[in-house]
Image: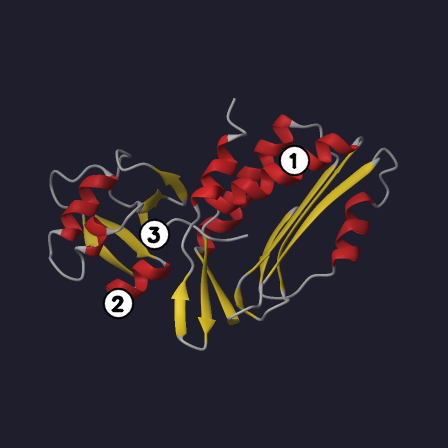
Amino acid sequence: MTVRILYFASLREALGTSGETLDLPPGVATTGALRDHIAARGEPWLQLARAKNLRCAVNQAMVGFDAAVKAGDEVAFFPPVTGG
Amino acid sequence: MSVSVQEADFDVGAEIAALTAGNVDAGAVASFVGLVRGGTIEAMTLEHYPAMTGKALDDIVAEARQRWELLGVRVIHRVGRLLPGDRIVLVAVASTHRQAAFEACEFIMDYLKTRAPFWKREETAAGGRWVDARDSDDEALRRWAE
């Protein structure tokens, strides 16, 4: 079972991709754990661990890094928003 | 339709007229229009998270309607490449009296600035750069906490 992961704005540029589909690794059950799992790949993914004020959303709702992630979810990582 | 995310420009006068058309109870409309500031900026590109933006804006409008008695709300946010002087965003709020309209308009903008998934990238003669979020936007949001 997989999760769809999306990256936006400066993070998308730094990673060189707008998203990926990932098999949810055993033991990864929160947005924070998922972020750490991806960052552990090394550069450029370490950007996820380094990014100041990284934000995330699960199924299009902004959440914290303790939010639950399960198979089939859409998880987005992005910098603080700057619209308006 | 109270919320739109679009590339096209909008007509502020027509939007405000439509907001109160046929509603003679409306005694006030407050509106805010955000523009691309010029200066060193040659253009600005707005990226967004299409699956989330409409929902985030709907949630903000719903929250405002819970806090104030509102007769109509219209939010339009543009995406894509814009030039100095171009309109970026419209928030227009109709109510029976001015206080609710003024406050709800500010509330919606403050929430939009920190909760709606849009990102600005500026183009200058020196190259492109992503706009940093401002701490003052978070502070603006905090005043609505009760």
Amino acid on which the number 2 mark rests in the picture: Gly
Which residue position holds label 2? A16
Which residue is found at the position 75% from the left and 35% from the top?
B71
Amino acid on which the number 1 mark rests in the picture: Ala
Q: Which mark is residue B104?
A: 1
Give the image quarter of residue A19: bottom left
* Inter-mark Cα distance, 2 to 1: 39 Å
Kindly identify which chain the residue marked by label 2 belongs to. A
Q: Which residue is at the front of the view, B127 or A80? A: B127
* Inter-mark Cα distance, 2 to 3: 13 Å
Marks 2 and 3, the one that precedes in the sequence = 2
Classify mark 3: residues with Cα within 10 Å, few (<14), some (14-19) or many (20+): many
Q: Is residue B115 visible?
A: no
Which residue position holds label 3? A78
Which residue is found at the position 36% from the left and 58% from the top?
A8
Q: Are marks 2 and 1 on the same chain?
A: no
Q: Are marks 3 and 1 on the same chain?
A: no
| Secondary structure of the residue carrying numbered label 1 | helix
Q: Which residue is at the front of the view, A33 or B27? A: B27
Q: Position of residue B102 (x, y in %)?
A: 70, 37
Confirm or deny contact between disc 2 and disc 1 (CB under 8 A).
Answer: no
Seen from this angle, which residue lies furthest top?
B146
Quick check: A53 above or below B42? above
Q: Position of residue B50 (x, y in %)?
A: 46, 56
Kindly identify which chain the residue marked by label 3 belongs to. A
Which residue is found at the position 59% from the left and 34% from the top?
B62
Q: Position of residue A46 (x, y in %)?
A: 17, 55
Residue B65 is left or right of residue B127, and the answer is right
Nearer mark to the viewer, of 2 and 1: 1
| Secondary structure of the residue carrying numbered label 3 | strand
Amino acid on which the number 3 mark rests in the picture: Phe
